[in-house]
Structure formats: structure tokens, C-alpha cells
Amino acid sequence: NEDDGSCYYSEDITIEILLDNLDSFVGEVIEIDGVITVAAGRLRTNFTEAFLQDESGRGIILYSSQLDTSFIRGDSVHVVAEVDEYDGKPELIYSSITVLKQNAEIPVEEISISVFNTLPLQYNYTFVRVWGKIISRNEPRPGNEGTNISIQDESGEVTTVRIWNSTNILYNDVGDEIINDELDSLLQVGRIIEVAGIGGEFSSASQLQPAYATDISEKLEGQIGDFGATLSVFPYPFVPQLGEVIKYSYSFPSDARIKLRVFDTVGRLITTLYD
């Protein structure tokens, strides 16, 4: 721009290039492509931030002065935005977002907790996936609008999974009622889980923020196979008030890993019969 000396970047720019050369880009307007990993309003409803990630494996904040819900997770988008850094956070203040494709593959970085802890700045605002055993869980309380779950992997490293009430993953917005009994059953001390979410830090410690219930799942060892395992249950349904008792039998190869569990009708774990 001859009037103010600003530049408009339209050549191929990845988020990695942008972040590694942030000082050179701040204040400039760029065009960039990527996939929405978390839509605005999920990680605290008063936040207008969404998150963009591309094939470089890095993520960045998309910012608007007002809550914009016109694009959702999985939208492949073309963004025109001014590069900014606010309170140490790199962000794109966008003027336009064009959806190129819906239901695109969500880019995610598969890393260990130890790598996540060693390179925190690299994974800030990036959608990553880790796994670990739950070693503690703190529930929401007044002034703390979410649940903190500590997980530890085989290296002994620990990180915090922060589930904001605004996501409605586990609790309602107020934080006084569990609305996902099945996930509540999974998120118990001793269970091994996989978690995907936006990387960050809080009080100088690593933190992972899932935004959707599908971001959390049980960590399965090995692969689900087709090895002739059988399960027979009779009668079904059964009426315990009439003295009926479920009879069950099962079989599986000697080299298989089997977990046989009983859940109630709303998905809560009742007991483990075999592991």
C-alpha cells in the first residue's frame, strides 16, 4: 500500500511459517488456508476465538470482535486476516472467511505427554492428541468453570485435561449437573484415555482443552480384531423382579486382550466381569 507502506501477503503461507516469523508479519494482511479444529464459543462462551490448523501441524487463533458461529469444526476455509499478537498470543483478526469444503479431515498432532511438556510453545493453540491414565479429577466449583483431570503416560509425565463447562462435554453450563453419564463413567481415576484438544499452558503447566465429547475416548491396546471372540447372553431382556438371572458365556483366543463390562441403560459402568 503506497499510502501507509503496509503489505498484503497472498503467496502460499503456512501457519508454521507465520508463527516462526511472527515479528515480520504482525500488522500485515495475509491470505491463508486451513481447517477449523474448534469453533468459536466452545472454550468459554464469552470467547470469540476459534482455532485454525493446516498441514504444517501448527495451530493459531482466529479472532473476531463478536461471536461468529458461521463456520464449524471440519470446515476447510480460506482466510483473509490481519496478523496480530495480543498479550503474547498470536492471532488472526479476520475480515473474511470462505468455506471451501465441509467435513474435511481434522488435522491433529499425535504426541506423547513428555513431548507436549517439553515443547509447550510449539503446541500452544494447536490441536493435539495424547493418552494417559487418569490420576486425579477435580470437579467444577464456584469461580472455576470447568473440570480438571490429570493424566499420566508411561514416561511418568503428567498434563492437565481442562474440560470447560461451556463445551457441555461433561457438565452443563453452570457446572452443577453431569449431562454425559457415559463420559463420566469413563473419566474415573485409573482409567486410560485418549484426549484431543487445543494445547496451552496455565500457571506454567501444560494444559489440553477438548471441545467436543468425541475428543475423549478409551485408550484401546492393540487393534480391534476379528479373531472369533463370541458372547452369548440369555434371556434378553430380563426382569430381575421376577427372579430372572442373566446367563452369559464367552470365548476368545489365548492371544487376545478382552474386556467384558456391564453398563446400565444410560451408559454408566456397573462392573467389569473380565479384563
Image (spheres, rainbow, N blue to C red):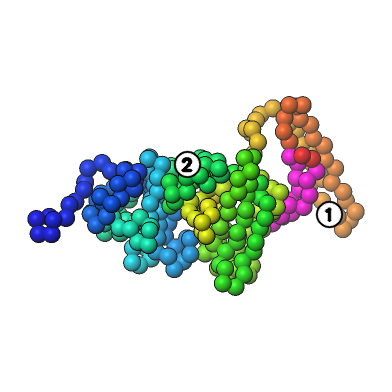
Splitting the image into 4 quarters, where does residue 194 fall? top right
Q: Which residues are magenta?
A: 259-273
Vertical relation: 155 (above or below) 180: above
Q: Residues within 10 Å of mark 2 (few under 14, many from 20)?
A: some
Mark 1 / mark 2, whichever is N-terminal: 2
Q: Residues within 10 Å of mark 1 (few under 14, many from 20)?
A: few
Left or right placement of residue 106 versus residue 18 in this view? right
- Inspect the image, locate mark 1, and give the three-letter code of the amino acid beneath it: Val
User: In the rendered picture of this protein, how many numbered marks are placed on residues?
Assistant: 2
**x and y, in percent, of residue 275 in the image:** 77, 39
Instruction: Name the foreground residue: 196 vs 243.
Output: 196
Q: What residue is pinned by disc 2?
A: 109
For the point 33% across and 45% down, the residue is 20
Tell me if residue 262 is in the magenta stretch: yes
Residue 74 makes an appearance in the image:
no
Numbered badge on residue 164: none
Q: Residue furthest left?
A: 2
For the point 26% across and 51% down, the residue is 25
Numbered badge on residue 239: 1
